Image (cartoon, rainbow, N blue to C red):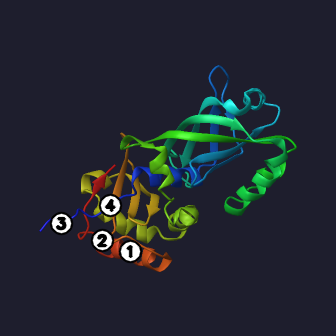
């Protein structure tokens, strides 16, 4: 009988969705122009990203002048840990495709639709100091300490963010501030040589496991601790973390 290996981490397309949902900063790069910061960036299931850029930026003016054809562009998003780490960047995501202008008479309606899934005060600036653009994604690349992986537009359309990504930041901050004992017990999974003299922080959490950041003297290390089974709700996620903390010898290590 063939046994399927258990999933120990989100697949790449899911990681892209989660990183996009969590990223606080992003830059739109159009060939020949300086990158421009975006105040809104929402990856939608249809395979495009709605972004807001300053209305008076050269990028906004250029894209608008291109009409229906659009122009090639890359959106770079930075996924940062919600904790004060020595190196706060967890991952970088590059989404490549064609950026198009959103007609002026539909800007407000699109902003309202985006706000339903992605409430953001910056959407109030649309039609004033900001303008919306659509980046139709052809492919995406995500890079972290484990390396880089790419996914296609179709793979992105079939994926969803991790179900816990919206609450991940609050969970990690709560662990860091109020549950040093849990972090210490999770750190018992680490090889003694890696723990010695190092600071251990919770770096990420998703339905498949917890990732620890080990800040050692010579370098940082990211170690993933998988759950026995994926969590499906808040209660099962809490139980999975408690099980990891209770038994440091039951689960395997995965260096990222």
Give whichever of discs 3 and 4 has the lower sequence position.
3
The N terminus, quarter of image: bottom left
Q: Residue furthest right?
A: 128
Q: Residue furthest left?
A: 1
Tag nearer the camera, 3 or 1: 3
Q: Report the residue marked by disc 2.
A: 228
Q: Point out residue 111 in the picture as x, y percentages from the top left corner.
A: 77, 53
Q: Does the CB distance between marks 3 and 4 fall below 8 Å?
A: no
Give whichever of discs 1 and 2 has the lower sequence position.
2
Relative height, residue 135 to residue 176 (above, below): above
Marks 4 and 2, how far apart in space? 9 Å
Mark 3: few/some/many CA within 10 Å (<14, 14-19, 20+): few
Tag 4 secondary structure: loop
Mark 2: few/some/many CA within 10 Å (<14, 14-19, 20+): some
Q: Does the CB distance between marks 4 and 1 fall below 8 Å?
A: no
Marks 4 and 1, how far apart in space? 13 Å
At 24% from the left edge and 71% from the top edge, which residue is drawn? 250
Tag 3 secondary structure: loop
Marks 3 and 4, how far apart in space? 15 Å
Tag nearer the camera, 3 or 2: 3
Relative height, residue 33 to residue 195 (above, below): above
Q: Which mark is residue 3?
A: 3
Mark 1: few/some/many CA within 10 Å (<14, 14-19, 20+): many
Marks 1 and 2, how far apart in space? 8 Å
Q: Does the CB distance between marks 1 and 2 fall below 8 Å?
A: yes
Q: Relative to the observer, which residue lies in front, 37 or 103?
A: 103
Q: Report the residue marked by disc 1.
A: 240
Give whichever of discs 3 and 2 has the lower sequence position.
3
Q: Point out residue 158 in the picture as x, y percentages from the top left corner.
A: 47, 56
């Amino acid at each position: 009988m063939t046994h399927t290996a258990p999933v120990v981490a989100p697949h790449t397309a899911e990681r892209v969705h989660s990183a996009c949902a969590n990223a606080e900063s992003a830059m739109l790069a159009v060939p020949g122009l300086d990158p421009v910061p975006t105040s809104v960036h929402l990856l939608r299931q249809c395979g495009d990203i709605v972004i807001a850029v300053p209305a008076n930026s050269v990028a906004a003016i250029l894209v608008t002048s291109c009409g229906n054809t659009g122009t090639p562009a890359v959106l770079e998003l930075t996924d940062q840990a919600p904790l004060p780490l020595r190196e706060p960047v967890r991952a970088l995501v590059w989404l490549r495709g064609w950026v198009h202008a959103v007609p002026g008479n539909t800007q407000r309606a699109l902003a309202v639709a985006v706000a339903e899934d992605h409430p953001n005060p910056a959407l109030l600036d649309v039609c004033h100091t900001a303008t919306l653009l659509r980046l139709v994604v052809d492919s995406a690349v995500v890079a972290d300490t484990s390396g880089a992986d790419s996914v296609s537009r179709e793979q992105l359309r079939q994926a969803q963010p991790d179900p816990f990504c919206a609450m991940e930041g609050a969970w990690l901050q709560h662990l860091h501030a109020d549950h040093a004992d849990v972090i210490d017990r999770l750190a018992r999974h680490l090889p003694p040589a890696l723990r010695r003299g190092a600071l251990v922080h919770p770096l990420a959490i998703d339905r498949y496991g917890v990732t620890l950041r080990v800040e050692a003297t010579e370098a940082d290390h990211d170690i993933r601790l998988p759950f026995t089974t994926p969590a499906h709700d808040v209660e099962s996620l809490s139980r999975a973390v408690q099980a990891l903390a209770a038994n440091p010898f039951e689960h395997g290590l995965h260096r990222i």
